Image (cartoon, rainbow, N blue to C red):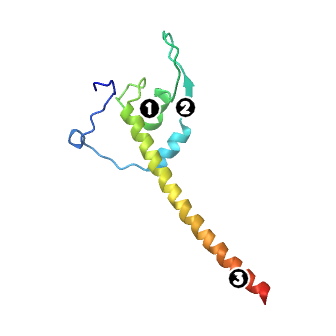
Amino acid sequence: TAGGVWTNASDVNLKENFTELNSEDVLQKISLLPVTQWNYKDTRVAETHIGPMAQDFKTLFGLGVKGDDKVISTIDISGVTLVAVKAIIKKHESLEKLLLHQHQLISIILKEIDLLIRK
């Protein structure tokens, strides 16, 4: 863009072979992905970054250009991240429901205990 922002073509009409993903599987792979802080060799400006290595990302997710394990596409890392966030949201919602249910059960048990004590 004019502001120097990288944009990826993402129009549905440019894509094919859509596959549903197992978000739990993606989350598990992320847990295995080494993520470190590092800097590029031989740069004139001191700068550091945080991220995975392309080889590890390619091994775990198999994304990108076949035979090229030296780069990670911004669209792939964004997509993996979004799938993981959705998995975490799903887990969070499930845990919230469980916690609410347990809270309700505890309230019932405490009332029953109170009734037994008062007898």
Question: Label 3, label 2: how many angstroms apart (C-alpha)?
Answer: 51 Å
> Which badge, 1 or 2, comes first in the chain's sequence?
2
> Relative to residue 90, is residue 26 depicted above or below?
above
Residue labelled with disc 3: 112
Question: What residue is rendered at 48% in x and 56% in y?
Answer: 90
The quarter in which the N terminus is drawn is top left
Real-space Cα separation, disc 1 to disc 3, in angstroms: 57 Å
Q: Nearer the viewer, mark 3 or mark 2?
A: 3
- Report x, y in % for residue 48: 53, 21
The picture places residue 12, in percent across and down from the top left corner, at: 24, 43
Instruction: Give the residue type that dot 3 points to.
Output: Glu
Helix, strand or loop at label 1? It is helix
Helix, strand or loop under label 3: helix
Disc 1 to disc 2, C-alpha distance = 14 Å
Between 65 and 13, the one nearer to me in the picture: 13
- Tell me where residue 62 sits by quadrant: top left
Q: Which numbered disc, 3 or 2, marks the residue that appears first in the sequence?
A: 2
Chain-order first, disc 1 or disc 3:
1
- Tell me where residue 109 appears, x and y as whole percent: 69, 78
Q: Which residue is mark 1?
A: 58
- Most extreme residue toward the front is 3
Look at the picture and state if 13 lies above or below 107.
above
**Left or right: 27, with 105 as reference point:** left
User: What residue do we see at 48% from left, 9% from top?
Assistant: 44
Instruction: Identify residue for label 2.
Output: 35
User: How crowded is the residue under tag 1: few (<14 C-alpha within 10 Å), some, or many (20+)?
Assistant: some
Left or right of 49: which side holds 69? left
Residue at 20% across, 42% down: 13
> Can residue 62 be seen?
no
Q: Is residue 9 visible?
A: yes
- Disc number for residue 12: none
Q: Amino acid at mark 2?
A: Val
